[in-house]
Image (cartoon, rainbow, N blue to C red):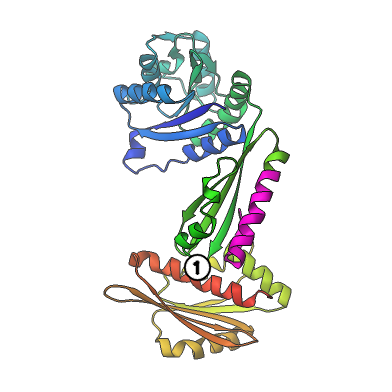
Amino acid sequence: MPSAEIITIGTELLLGETVDTNTRTVALALRSVGVDLYRTITIGDNTERIAQAIQESLERADIVITTGGLGPTVDDPTRQAVAQAVNIELEYHPELWEQIVERISRYGRTPTENQKRQAYVPRGAQVISNPVGTAPAFIVEHGSKAVISLPGVPREMETLLNKNVLPYLQKRYNLHEIILVRVLHTSGVSEGLIDEKIGDLEQWSNPSVGLAAHSGIVDVRITAKAKTLEQAKRQIDKLEKEIRQRLGRAIFGADDETLEDVIMKTLAKRGWTLSAVESGCDGHLAHRLSGPGLDRVPVDILPSLANNLLAETVRQTCQKYHTNVGLGVIVTPHKEQVSVHLHLHTPIADQEQQLTYGGHPRNAPRWAVNMALDWLRLEVEPR
């Protein structure tokens, strides 16, 4: 199975002016055809540094994919950098210039002389015509390896990637495998505890297991490589069953499922309705309970609320909105930690919890909301 590295190019990325979405798009595409991605790099618009990065990537990987730096201006250096990296010259393609002139004419404009730069590509490169933009892409084969340069505009890049690059990779590297990923979501338990329960599984190579911690949620990622989708699914299903047995109710969903999705489905099955009140949460609870695909949950956002008033406020909120389940969350910052006060009212019982959070105060609202939603999930799920 070949390996790949991605180099995103643009000083605007390094300055934080533009968010890099291309890396994720390319990574997912490579995964779909069974290419291992080992490293991603971001380089500014500097020919020498780009060329050096390409050379270093070629020493490690079979495939190097660059995005960006193919425009018509002086600070679009990717063409020259690729040529320099593999020690060849640029050459002019009249047919590319004709395509560029035709594309620009669609906008009722005449191309400027500097746009002719886009008609130059490294000598011997395979040109990838760009039907949705003016910057042609290209592939330079370097022995058994390949440097693939794509435009930085996300839609243009994605179009050429799917239409031209993936078929090229499948043919050149005889790719007949896929990489399938399933992510199990857990809450209410720490990353360390999960690692203690499934650490031996994290040593497997195929399928493999990895952890990713968020505020109050830990994801368990299962990755399988196989020749067919069915084989990969079987590998993942078997390992997922083992992980679910070990982690039990800590797992609330998989892939695109969210805590709020699971909660609302459970409440609907029981014929229960939900309202909530939050204070000090920066609107996180209201935002989570009004997401796409969810029935609107009324959430009162109070600027301040004393802990000893939370229980009564939750009951009043239930009466106000005619609901039979109420959730209340208060986040109160202190000098060295943040306190979180929770109240839950259901047709079965009223309960309270007092928690403390010692991480960055700005992460406290998100953590508190995840803990509150997980508590609600566990209490309303039939056992």
Q: Position of residue 89 (x, y in %)?
A: 38, 9
- Magenta span covers which residues? 234-255
* Residue at image coords 61%, 53%: 255
Which residue occupies the foreground of this view, 371 or 272?
A: 371
As for residue 19 lying within the magenta part, the answer is no
In the image: residue 322, left or right of residue 123 = right
The residue positioned 60% from the left and 43% from the top of the image is 207
Q: Is residue 194 above or below residue 22?
A: below
> What secondary structure is the stretch in magenta mostly built from?
helix
The amino acid on which the numbered mark 1 sits, given as a three-letter code, is Asn
Please tell me how crowded label 1 is: few (under 14), some (14-19), or many (20+) other residues with Cα within 10 Å. many
185 to 313, vertically: above or below: above
Residue position for label 1: 370
Residue 31 or residue 228, whichever sits in front? 228
Residue 174, located in which quarter of the rendered image? Answer: top right
User: Can residue 254 be found in the magenta stretch?
Assistant: yes
